[in-house]
Amino acid sequence: MKKLSLLLSFLIITGLLLTACGGQVEETPVVVEEPVVVEGIADLGGQEITIAVENAYLPFNYIDPDTGEPAGWDYDVWHGICDLINCTPVFVEAAWEGMIQAVADGQFDAAGDGITITEERAEIVDFSVGYVALEQRLLVRADEDRFETIEEIVTDEALKLGTQTGTTNYETAATYLPVERIQAFEQFPFAVQALISGDIDAVIIDEVAGQGYLGENADALKLVGPSMSSDFLGFIFPLGSELVGPVDLAIAELAQNGFLDEVNKVYFGSDFSITYDDLFPPDPIKIGLVTDVGEIDDKSFNQSAWEGVQLAGEEYGAEVDYIETKDAKDYMVNIELFTKNDFDIVVTVGFALGEATLEAAALYPDVYFIGVDQGQWGGAVDNVVGLIFNEDKSGFMAGALAGLLTETNTVAAVLGTDLIPPVVAFKEGYESGAAYVNPDVSVISTYHPGGMDVAFTDPEWGATTAKQALDNGADVVFGAGGKTGNGALIETAGVEGAYCIGVDSDQWFTVPEAHLCLVSSAMKLITPGVFDLVKLHQDGETASGNFYGAFGLAPFHDFDADISQEIIDQLAEIRELLLNNELDTGYPLD
């Protein structure tokens, strides 16, 4: 650590040894693997010594995340001490709050835990000699540029400082700021989380602990400014304890023979890699998905979004769940079933949920909302992102494929409701793409006549509408409307020589009944889009506003032989033109 220094100078240690032992000590430390017993140091005859530790203060004491066993500087040094004075250390886990008083009351023989030596504490407990001088620093967010010193915090009355109750860090804070500008937490992890969340502006913390909190938060946190104090740490004992003298002499010998130096290299050196993130990994995130009135297994839109949530769940060990909306009036109720149960991310699927999503985002600012097909045109909201797509471009490619494959010069589109802009975009793009490659083509496009509660869940209507188009000469059918569109695909599969084109995802994998006609699908890559937004959020790069997902055609699967190289090349050229916005897709409409 940058400003960590070895406690006692050898002059002080040498003086202690000369006084106690009446002998000489070597002036040059000798590094040894095991402590060497020095004549004159007390022999406690194997006495058990109870030592209070928190097991939550790096690097002094902790539970090793790999082994599950207690470890740390306190453990190694106390074993070294007891090897010298012939005692048996018995470590007892105890909360920091109340630890000093518990030792004062005789509940423990001693305590480690990096306790700062102060005059006030010395009134109720005895201290060993100091063993480490520790610096107090400011821990701030990585992008903090308003201040670097405690003095700058003092002058800006809007800034708040955090620390832990009952620590010298709190006492230091109180020397600079009035109590109303100090937010004290029972444990430092709570203070650090409040800092990351923006509830406070800085934390006063021991540098060793601060380095431990950086860990996986290195991109989110940093230590700034000079040291505000340099305090010696010591072990504590009940007043009048007969252990103080033997322990002091043992500490001095451990420093003199090189043992402490070796232990310090292990725990305070650059090779020590355990962080508080390792000791206290965050609780698994919780991701919920709310469908529109379409069902989760629609083999299209909702299903693709749910698969993105499931991928994120596997990647981050997240708890995932979904709610199928049966009635539009339940949008907010269903969203709140997640927000009120501490879900971190809520994915709402479909244009129709846009208003409810924004309303929920205002009520629950700590929840991150991903609105699939919900363009954020009214201005960015920090905790909302709209996952939107260029449906017109995807539809254009589907139309171009249809226009190149048709032998009757008649193609069709069976669609959900025109109340949903993405459906309109698919339709307009499809018609424009077909006309672009085949000026003689005729397109039969039909929207579902019902409202949003039925337009995407009516495969019978989709089948009937597709049959009508086929009877009128269409030999390629584009089904774009959830289960309604799936009905059109399946109906087309029963007509020899006809092609069908799916939507949203590669429907080869979701509608096997359509394999006899399914040449491709006009894809909105919803699954990777949802996953990518969760990943950005988890990586600390949360997106807001509008996030455009990718578009394109799915593979041709069993129809590879039907698709000539000329068609493949033409589709590739069209995609490049679309990416460069060099083609008029017919959408948005004037």
Image: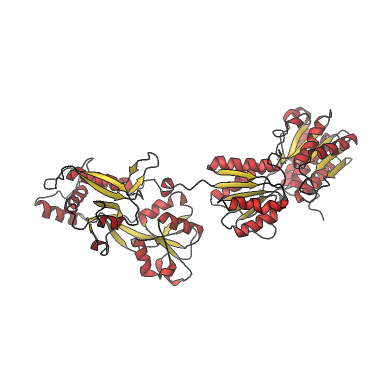
Q: Which is nearer the eye, 454 or 208?
A: 454
Indicate the position of residue 218 as horizontal and vertical percent values.
Answer: 46, 52
Residue at image x 83%, y 31%?
498
Position of 56 relative to 123 (above/below): above
In this rendering, the count of numbered labels is: 0
Indicate the position of residue 316 as horizontal and vertical percent values.
Answer: 53, 43
**Could one spot residue 541 in this view of the protein?**
yes
In screen coordinates, is 281 left or right of 341?
left
In screen coordinates, is 337 left or right of 145?
right
In screen coordinates, is 208 left or right of 493?
left
Indicate the position of residue 413 as horizontal and vertical percent values.
Answer: 82, 41
Q: Quadrant of residue 185?
A: bottom left
Residue at image x 82%, y 40%?
461
**Could one spot residue 8 in this view of the protein?**
no
Position of 286 relative to 148 (above/below): above
Q: Quadrant of residue 295?
A: top right
Indicate the position of residue 514 as horizontal and vertical percent values.
Answer: 76, 32
The quarter of the image holding the C terminus is bottom right
In screen coordinates, is 382 left or right of 23?
right
Q: Identify the image's colour scheme: rainbow, by chain, secondary structure or one colour.
A: secondary structure
As drawn, the residue found furthest toward the right would be 472
Residue at image x 25%, y 48%?
50
